[in-house]
Image: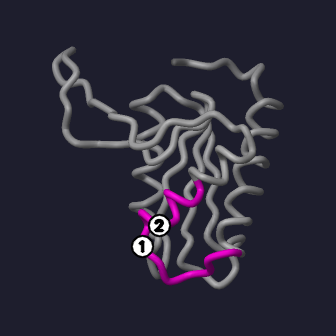
Amino acid sequence: MNHSTSNGDLHADLTERILSASYAVHTALGPGLLESAYEACLAHELTCRGIPFQRQVKLPIRYKEQPVDAGYRIDLLIEELVVVELKAIDKLLPIHEAQLLTYLKLSQMRVGLLLNFNVLHLRDGIKRRVL
């Protein structure tokens, strides 16, 4: 699932649509819930907006040329283009960004969003990364 750089505009438009849906969820719920609640509500919001996605997508690692299921899951894979990793934690740390970058490499996706819903203003909990 490798996508070329010619999809830049498509990625930008899609990430804006994902962020718009995320803001709607955060506005409705605010901080303080479990990650699973935000994931379920964001999935509902994406469905309402007609944005195709998959939840909890298995992400095997490759070891000695063999895929190995090590329990990794992409929270949301949007239109098979954007990896979305959700958090509901006090503060995003470098390890969370490293996790997103690893998921991008393993999935061969280029664009990822790290969204922390446990903030007063969602804009303070957003990281966008491009490989």
Looking at the image, is 61 positioned above or below residue 36?
above
Q: Quadrant of residue 112?
A: top right
In the displayed structure, 78 sits above or below 18; it is: above
* Residue position for label 1: 34
Q: Nearer the viewer, residue 81 or 46?
A: 46
Q: CA distance from mark 2 to mark 1?
A: 5 Å
Which residue in the protein does label 2 denote? 37
Q: Pick the residue in front: 66 or 76.
A: 76
The residue shown at (72%, 45%) is 15
Q: Looking at numbered disc 2 in the image, what kind of residue is underneath it?
A: Ala
What segment carries the magenta color? 28-42
Q: Is 5 included in the stretch rendered in magenta?
A: no
Per the image, label 2 sits on a secondary structure element best described as helix
Q: Are marks 2 and 1 in contact (CB under 8 Å)?
A: yes
Q: Amino acid at mark 1?
A: Leu
User: x and y percent of residue 48 in the render?
Assistant: 71, 47
Pinpoint residue 71: horizontal percent, then vertical percent: 22, 42
Q: Residues within 10 Å of mark 2 (few under 14, many from 20)?
A: few
Which residue occupies 65% across, 44% down? 47
In this orientation, which residue lies closer to the viewer: 87 or 39? 39
